[in-house]
Amino acid sequence: MSLTIAVVGARGRLGHVVAQAALAAGHSVIAITRDGRLPQTLAGATARKADALKRDELMAATRGADVIFNALNPLYPDWKTMCPVLAKNVVAAAKANGAHHLFAGNVYNYGREIPPLAGPETPVHGSTRKGAIRIAMDERFERAARDEGVDTTTLRAGDFFGGPGRGSWFDLIIAAPLGKHKYVWPGRPDIPHAFAYLPDLARAFVALAERHGELKGFTVFTFAGHTLTGEEMGRHLDVATGKRLRRVSFSWLGLRAVGLFRPFMREVIELSYLWFTPHALDGTKFEAFVGGFEATPTSRAIAEAVRELKAEEKAAA
């Protein structure tokens, strides 16, 4: 059955790929951006304009949606002030339009206590600023589901790589020096770290949207994605580049020096524990629910991500 899926933040990295995946699956897409403009790659979507910080605008822009996919993600220094407002406004839009709310979660909820394998039932801890904000957002969604009848489904995933757009650890740090026959690993090279290949994650959100009628109340899933140590990442990058790469360390000390003057960097530093704490996400509940979900093999996903980076560099030269 064809759905109408409203993607809030459709020009952002995740929103873009989810909108593309929904169109590819035969659904109608309402692509919502601040200025109402869309890239050519979303030509099949209906463009609508809304400032998500303005409740009435968001309610109007999402009119007619069966599912509202929430890809809103302010810059880290703005989380404290903006995230509560955005959460409240998306809930209001979903309630006004009788839509299911689909939210893009992450691993911050687990705090510094994140275990080697985290799942939907793993306890959350507000031991970081961003983790506490994410927990408060989930609590707001849970209350809305219980008291206002606004169903919310959250899918938590690891660090992004692949797909259009840039801004993740993979493309800005890990793969940045590939042309110099090296790669950067931000933490201990022998511990696993959770990643999410964006084209796979986008398909996962569409799969949940397609079965949203079975998801009542507040539901949390975790997306297994690809779990890799620094050593494993290096081997895959060797294959992707056809080179024998040298692993180099990331200078957290240098970043802390920069963080004295730049609030964004201070927020990034807060997440350094994720590169020194082994963790992975348990996709059992998600995979059992959607059935038959096949992730892209790791080597192919990394090779494709590297190919996209090279193509962008060539186009920019």
Image: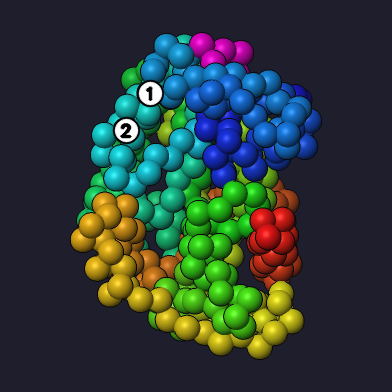
Q: How far apart are marks 1 and 2 (CA)?
A: 8 Å
Horizontal side of 190 relative to 209 (left or right) equals left
Q: Which residue is drawn at 76% across and 27% down?
A: 44
The main secondary structure of the magenta stretch is: loop
Q: Residues within 10 Å of mark 1 (few under 14, many from 20)?
A: some
Secondary-structure class at tag 1:
loop
Residue 56 at x, y percent in the picture: 42, 11
Horizontal side of 144 relative to 25 (left or right) equals left
Residue 211 visible from this viewpoint: no
Residue 178 visible from this viewpoint: yes
Secondary-structure class at tag 2:
helix
Query: Relative to the observer, which residue lies in front, 135 or 307?
Result: 307
Q: Which residue is drawn at 72% across and 56% down?
A: 315
Identify the amino acid type marked 2: Met
Task: Tell me, yes or no, whether the two marked residues, 1 and 2, touch with CB atoms within 8 Å.
Answer: yes
Q: Is residue 34 magenta?
A: no
Q: Is residue 64 magenta?
A: yes
Query: Relative to the observer, which residue lies in front, 33 or 315?
Result: 315
Horizontal side of 229 relative to 116 (left or right) equals right
Horizontal side of 26 relative to 174 (left or right) equals right
Asked where in the image residue 303 lies, by quadrant, the reply is: bottom right
- Compared to residue 94, the image places residue 301 above or below, namely below
- In the rendered image, the quadrant that contains the C terminus is bottom right
Identify the amino acid type marked 1: Leu
- Compared to residue 21, the image places residue 84 above or below, namely above
The label shown at residue 82 is 2
Q: Residue at x 65, y 52 (%)?
A: 163
Q: Residue at x 31, y 58 (%)?
A: 265
The label shown at residue 53 is 1
Which portion, as a residue range, is magenta?
Answer: 60-66
